[in-house]
Image (cartoon, coloured by chain):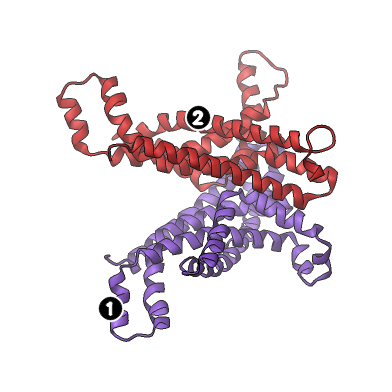
Chain colours: A purple, B red
Amino acid sequence: MDIELMISSFPKLLNATLITLKLLSVSLILGLFIGLGFAILRMNNNKLINKFAYGYSYIFRGTPLLVQIFIIYFGLGQIEYLRSTFLWIVLKEPYWCAIIAFSLNTGAYTSEILRSAFQTIKPGYLEAGRSLGIPSKIIFTKIQIPIAIKQSLPAYGNEIILMLKGTSLASTVTLMDLTGVAKYIISTTFKPVEVFIVAGGIYLFMTFIIHNVIKYLEKKYGFQT
Amino acid sequence: MELLYFGDKGWGDELFFATLMTIAVSITAMIIGFIFAALFTPLKLSNNKFFNSIGNAYTTVIRGVPELLVIYLFFFGGSGAIMFVASIFGYNDYIEINAFLTGSFSIGIISGAYSTEVFRGALQSIDKGQFEAAKVLGFKKYIYFFKIILPQMLRLAIPNLSNVWQITLKDTSLISVTGLVEIMRQSYIAAGSTRDPLFFYSFAAVLYLMLTFLSMQLLNRLETKYSKGY
């Protein structure tokens, strides 16, 4: 056990954690909007729109995240037309490619979580709202969304943790996130166990915090159904 | 489409064998995962605090750390560990372990952590009366487990195990970083030599979709078979 290496690599890994957290937070925020949008589309009565939303979540949940990143990072650059548009400014950066892939991926899972949350809302709540003469827009924003958020908290907490682990794939497109730096240190020092303990410890610490924040929120906003 | 021809011209046969490799790694990893689950589920359910904390440590650490990091640990650390064991027995040459074994082992450990949780949940949701009744009737230990508890546990576990299978199948794409030629690695090679990454990675996505779709069909059938009578 090389304690010195563990101590000397700690600040480097901690620095890389910032990139991991940045990737995680940006893609979770974007993914939440994407997920909400597709969850609403899923509940549409139009079959075509419904199928489209289902296809989106099926494709992104049925393929590995690695494939998705590679298609966006290596694949899209091949389309000549894209290179001439302003999109190329975004797509040539591995950072943004990773964010696009992560957001689309977590968006697919989030849409499923939100959809099932919306569907488990008791019809009585909506009927009560309607019989009180509340406009359907306000029923949606003031009744359905808050209840859905509360019901989807446990599943969404899992999704945040899965996404945290997913950000490690950013290291495959040259980004130096926590896993990327850990791999670099391992391959230069050939001390995998020590680096794994430090980097894994940082990841575990983050999952621990996320887990407890979600638990706290569940307790705070929890209600009996 | 020419790119997918079989033989020297296209990449069809290479991608076909790569798909078989992905399936082989996934199944091996799943089996290794079951072995780990069989070891750790009793520990997690044990009343002994020490055993209990070992079981919990396994599932917490593996499920809280990125898969890629676990793979790097075994990829870089695997041959070192084996060489260390071999040196105790007086064997000092360099040993390189097979990429297939390292890959299936690291994915297996990950899938084992998920399987452990599934089995634990399934065992805990079997009615207590079933255990008591089996004990009262004086069944032998292995009949008690294999004929009474296991079938009930499988019924409850199979829907969740098919989720674990999906996760495992998708995780195998990560062992492409160790150089094992499965779908992802083969697409990377093909994309590099034809300069057509968009096509090959999209095709890889289609292959994965096909695998997940087909395996879901099979597992759903298994699920209906085991929930007969309910």
Direction from residue B73 to residue A32 in the image, left or right: left
Give SS at disc 2.
helix
Quadrant for the N terminus of chain A in the image: top right
In the image, is B14 to the left or to the right of A26? right
Rate crowding at label 2 as few (under 14), some (14 to 19) or many (20 or more) other CA atoms within 10 Å: some
Of all residues shown, which one is farthest toward the front?
A: A47
Q: Residue at x 62, y 30 (%)?
A: B102
Q: Are tags 1 and 2 found on a single chain? A: no
Check the image and name the residue furthest to the left: B136
Instruction: Give me the residue at 28% from left, 37% from top.
Output: B229
What amino acid type is highlighted by mark number 1?
Ala
The image quadrant that residue B47 belongs to is top left
Q: Residue at x 48, y 37 (%)?
A: B218
- Expressed as whole percent of the image width and height from the top left, the position of residue B25 reads 60, 32
Q: Residue A27 appears in which quarter of the rendering?
A: bottom right
Q: Is residue B51 visible?
A: no
Measure the alpha-carbon separation of dots 1 and 2.
52 Å
Q: Position of residue B1 (x, y in %)?
A: 79, 46
The residue at the far top in this view is: B90
| Front one among B130 and B16 | B16
**Residue at numbered disc 2:** B31
On the image, the x and y values in percent for residue A133 come to 32, 86
Rendered location of residue A73, percent (x, y): 74, 56
Q: Identify residue for label 1.
A: A128
